Amino acid sequence: MENMEYAEELVREFLIFRGFTSTLQTYESELRADICKGFQVDKILDLIFSVYIPKFQAEKLVGLLSFFKQYLSSSSEAVLIGTLSKLEASILRYYIVHALQVGRRDRVVDFFAMRGNELLERSHDWTPWFAIPYIKNPHLDPEFRIYFSKEWFEAMQLSVRNFFCEIFNGSRLPALLKISSDANSTNNLKRDIGQLNLKLSQLQALLEEKEEQLSQLRSMEGSNDSSSILREEGIYALKDTPEVCTTINPQIGQTEFSQDSDVAGPSKIHSEFISFNHGDDLTSQLGELLGNGKTGDPSQIVHDSRQIENSEDVYVEEDFPEVKVEHQETFLGHTSPISRCRFSASGNNIASASLDGTVRIWTYDSSTPASRNATIYCGTEILSLDWECKSDRLLLIGTSDGCIKAWNVDAKRVVCDLNTTETFPSILCCCSVLDVKCSPVEPIFVSAAASGRVGSNNLDNLGFASLTVWNMKTWKAMTVLPLGEDPPAITSLCFNHNGKILAASATDGMIHMFDMSCGLQITGWPAHDSSISSILFGPDETSIFSLGSDGKIFEWSLQNQGQIMWSRNCSRLRYPADLKYCRHEMALDGSGRRLLVTSGSVRAPIYQVQGGRSGWRTLAHAASVTAVDWHPILPIFLTGSADNSVRVTSLR
C-alpha cells in the first residue's frame, strides 16, 4: 500500500511522544519481521481464533469486534454493518462452544454474567443460549448441535476471512494511510488553483494595458492641440528615467515637487564590460546557458544618455493609486524591525526575520496546518533567508556573526550550523553573511560573506568578500567562486531557472555572472555608481534587475549587454539614517510584470515593469517597509516593516 512507510513513521512518532517504549520495541520487532508490507487478514484471524478464543479473553474479543463496528459506522456502510453484526454473533457463539468443548463451563457462565444483558438487548435469539451451560450434552441438543459441527466452524471462519478482505480493500484504507494522500491531493488542487489565478492575473494585467492604450488613443484623437497631447503623454506615459522627484512634508501632509533634484542616469555609468581569462567568447556563453541566443558584443555597447536626459516624464510614487486588496493579514510576533521575509517554495509557509535575532515560521492560510510554526533564536541579527527550492523542509539563515543555520521545519531543529569565519579565517576574522541562495536544481547553496559587520545602513564599510558554494547533503564547502584580489563585498545573489548561472552584485556597483558548471566568472559590468543592494533575473531571463543603494533601479539586457531596457529612481524612498541593518531589496511577482521595492516611507511602490501604467502603492504600515517578497504563484505579496509587523496582502 502506498504511504505505508509514512503511516508507520507517524505511529513510531506517537509512541515515542507518549513514552510507550515497550510497545515501541514490540512494534519495531514486528516491522522487521513483516514481509508483506501490507494488509494481512491472517493476522486478524489468528488473533481471534488462536489467541482470544483459546485463552478465553472475552473482553479483548468483544473490544476488537466493537472497534470494527465503529470503523464501519464512520463510512455509512449499512450493509457491511449488518453483516458484521451477524458475524459477531457467530464468533461469540463459537467462543461458548469452544469453552464447552474443553470443559470450561465456568467461562460460559462468566461470559453471560458479563455480556448477557447486552446480548438480550440486541436479539432474543440469544435467550436459549443462557441454558446451554446447564445442559448435559449440548452437542446432541437439536437447538445447538449444528454449532458443534466442523462444517459450521469452517464456513464461519471463511465468512469472517472474506468479510475482512472486503472492508480493507483498496477503497477502504485506514485513516492513517489516507493522511499523505489527502495532503497530496490538497496540494495538487492548490497548485492548480494557483496556476489558474496566475493566468487570470496575467489576463487582467493585459486587459488593463490594452484599456490604457485605447484610452490614450482616444484622448489623442479628441485633442487638436499638440502641446496638450505632449503634456498628457508627459504625465501618463512611461519612459526610461524620471528627472523630477517628490518629497512629502509630514507637517502639512502635501506633496512638494523638487525641480532641482539631480538624477544620475546611465550616462554616469561606465559602459565598458569586463571579461575574465577566457577570451571574447565568454560573453556568448552567457546566452547559451540562459537559452537566450547571442548576447551582443561588449565593444559595441553605447548608452544613449541624451535620450534619457531629455526625457520629460513626470511620475510620483506618492501619487500611485493604492493596490486593490482582496484580503490582508498582519503578523505581530516580532519585537524589532523586520530584516527579511520569504515565502516557501510552495507558498504555504512564511519565514520572517527580525533584528531581535529571531526567525519565525508561520502560515497565513487557515487551511494550512500550523504544525511547522516555530520560533528560532539565533542570538544575533539575521541578514539573509532562503528556502530550499525543491521542498519546504529546509530554511537557510545567514547572520551578522558569520554563521549559516539550516533549520528543518518538520523536525523543528537546526540540522547544521556552519561558520564562515572558521572556514576562511585568513579572510574573514569577523564577518557577516549578507545573502544565501539555494540552487533551483542541485542540492547546493551559495553564501556571500564579507569581513566586518553590517551597521548604520552602510554597505560601503564592509571589507573583503567570500563567495562560497556549499553541499546541502554533506554540509561541506565545495568551492570558492573567484572574485579577484581583495574583492569588495557581495551583497545579493540570484540563480537563473536551471541553476547554471549565478548573478552576484557588489558594493563597488559591479554585477558578476558565474557559470556554475565550472565555477568560473563569465562576465561582469559596472551597473551603478554606488553599492548594489539587490539583484534579480527578469521573468524570461533575457534581462536582470539591479537596485542600487542610491535608490536607482535598472533593468539590463542580457542579449545586448549594457543596454538599459527600463529604469526608475526611488532615491527619495531611501531609509532614514537611524534604521540600522536594513538593506533595500526588491521582488518580482510570478508574471514578472510587477516589481515590489522596499521603502523608507510607510508605503512601498509596486512598479509595472511592462505596460502603460506607472504602478501602485501598498497599504500603509506604521513605519518604513524593510522587507518584501511575492508568492511564487499567486498574486500575494509580503511586506515587513520597521514597525515590527509583517503583512500578507492578497490582490484582487
Image (tube, grey):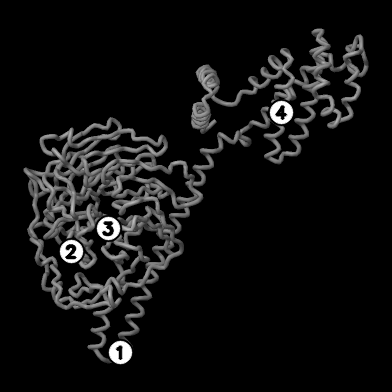
Q: Is mark 3 on a helix, strand or loop?
A: strand
Q: What element carries label 4?
A: helix
The numbered mark, 2 or 4, whose residue comes first in the sequence reads 4
In the rendered structure, which amino acid carries the disc numbered 3?
Met
In the rendered structure, which amino acid carries the disc numbered 1?
Ser
In the rendered structure, which amino acid carries the disc numbered 2?
Ile
Q: Do the residues labelled 1 and 4 touch (CB within 8 Å)?
A: no
Q: What element carries label 2?
A: strand
Instruction: Give the number of the disc on residue 440.
Output: none
Mark 2 surroundings within 10 Å by alpha-carbon count, few (fewer than 14), some (14 through 19), many (20 or more): many
Q: Are marks 4 and 3 in contact (CB under 8 Å)?
A: no
User: CA–CA distance between discs 4 and 3?
Assistant: 62 Å
Q: What residue is pinned by disc 4?
A: 163
Q: Which residue: 71% across, 41% down?
A: 76
The numbered mark, 3 or 2, whose residue comes first in the sequence reads 2
Position of 15 with respect to 362 (left or right) is: right
Q: Point out the image quarter for the C terminus.
A: bottom left
The nearer-to-camera label among 4 and 3 is 3
From the top left corner, tell me how far across and down residue 516 is, in percent: 20, 42
In the rendered structure, which amino acid carries the disc numbered 4?
Phe
Q: What residue is pinned by disc 2?
A: 564
Q: Do the residues labelled 2 and 4 touch (CB within 8 Å)?
A: no
Q: Which residue: 32% across, 48% down?
A: 353
Vertical relation: 192 (above or below) 254: above
Q: Are marks 1 and 2 in contact (CB under 8 Å)?
A: no
From the top left corner, tell me how far across and down residue 625 is, in percent: 30, 60
User: Which residue is at the far top?
Assistant: 103
Q: What residue is pinned by disc 1?
A: 223
User: CA–CA distance between discs 1 and 4?
Assistant: 84 Å
Vertical relation: 130 (above or below) 470: above
